Image: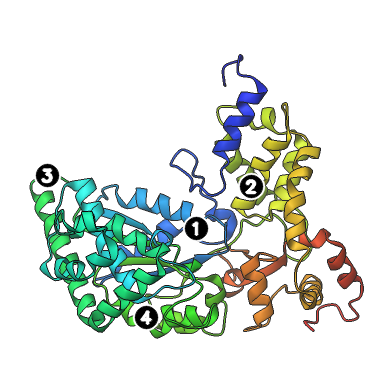
Amino acid sequence: MANSSDSDRDILRRVFNTCDPFRPASREHYFDCSEVRGSSSLIYEVMRRLDRTDDFLSFLFTGHIGCGKSSELKQLSRELAVPREDGKCYLPVFIDMEDYLDIYDADTTELLLAVVSDTAAQLREKLGIELEDNYFEKRLGEIKGFLLSDLEIGEGELSLGTAKVKLKALKGDAVARKKVRAALAPKTSNMLQEVNTVFENARAALREKKRKEQTPFDDLVIIVDSLEKIRGFGGRKEGEESHRELFIDRYAQLTGMQAHFIYTVPLRLVRSLAGPELEQRYDGAPFVLPMVKVNQRGSHEPYEPGRQSLLDLLALRVEPEPLERVFDSESLAFLLEYSGGQSRSLLQLAQSACAYADRLPIQLQHVKGAVKQTVQLYSSAPEHHWAKLAALDASPDQTIPGGDKDYLAMLENLSVLEYINGGVQETFEAAEPWYAVNPIVRQLTKFKKARSQLSTPGSHE
């Protein structure tokens, strides 16, 4: 319990910050919702595959924007670093590609440089391992004029372990990016081979430190986050063409790096007609993180286990205050219903409500105020989407037509949300995703009008 002298204003400020929707959950704030998502946990899936494989893992991970992917990846990172009963222990190398890549203009050159430089930097910072590689030091020497100022160039060479900060500058410098590509693109195949040399040297250094009992790690797992945000890649048209170019046409470059890799991939690509191709090129089907189910399929009746999980998740964010001290029962019910089971939406609404309230507990009027801006965003949906949203809502099975670009766009902009029932019985049916219109969208005038005009419920016209 917080100190009784803490004012409502102090508590609101504290909760406002702990409910930051863009900050992945810390160990203290992480709550495992896998049971009510209808899926196994990401940690279980990755660990099981690492235990079984004799090769290097290339694993794809996806889910809606804001469903908790980064929190799951951060928790996986923490679990990988815990020694197992068999003595295995992995050094997690977490790389946020949004730090390096312009999401509207990315290419393989920057991706490979980011992977090798960030890996080298983390080994240097965490374990004091200095990776030296003549090939990459030569390549960095070739492009340092595009990365460094005249003063910095005179100070010496750019090493692999210190290149990370300078390579991040490419994201905001289109001219330098173009020059780096021109210099290194002809060497891409050699770069991939040399990346693997760096990984082998890294594993050797880890094993040597473990032999000397200076570290528990004997291998590394590289987690590449934010690749799903890439819009333009390899000069292809923005969106699906670029996604195909990166994950399908150039899959050999992603799977050819000889280390365990986990990549985030766009849900839109996974649910497109290209989805089965991903399973054939990577290690199994992509792992999809669905929404927390808060309502029953079709009936929209509350699903209490899912709602309780979200309450537990939110309770961790407001500690040491009891949840009922911060939110009254009506405001909590509103948060659960209109989050749609999306953790980021839940936290965004909770955080915004803190800004509207002046005293505790936060009341219904405050969370209703918080949702107003979101309502305005969803109201601007393309006109032809409303009929399709209504058709989905009326359909008895709540599935979407395969390859329908409008529904794929709705998945991407969160007007349609994906769920899985889960369960141990009826394996195929339990694993099949189903879809529901975002609960905020269901309250909009245009949606209600389209819903009332349906002449044949269940059709996807």
Give the quarter of the image for residue 149: bottom left
Q: Would you name the residue on which mark 4 appears? A: 251
Residue at image x 41%, y 70%? 174
How far is the residue under mark 1 from the one under mark 4? 22 Å
Question: What residue type is disc 4 on?
Answer: Tyr
Which element carries disc 4, helix, strand or loop?
Answer: helix
The answer to which of marks 2 and 1 sits earlier in the sequence is 1
Question: What residue type is disc 1 on?
Answer: Lys
Q: Residues within 10 Å of mark 1 (few under 14, many from 20)?
A: many
Q: Residues within 10 Å of mark 2 (few under 14, many from 20)?
A: many
Question: What residue type is disc 3 on?
Answer: Glu
The answer to which of marks 2 and 4 sits earlier in the sequence is 4
Q: How is the image coloured?
A: rainbow
Q: Is residue 88 visible?
A: no
Q: Would you name the residue on which mark 3 appears? A: 213
Q: Is residue 427 above or below residue 281?
A: above
Q: Which mark is residue 348?
A: 2
Image coordinates of residue 19 in percent, x first then y, are 58, 41
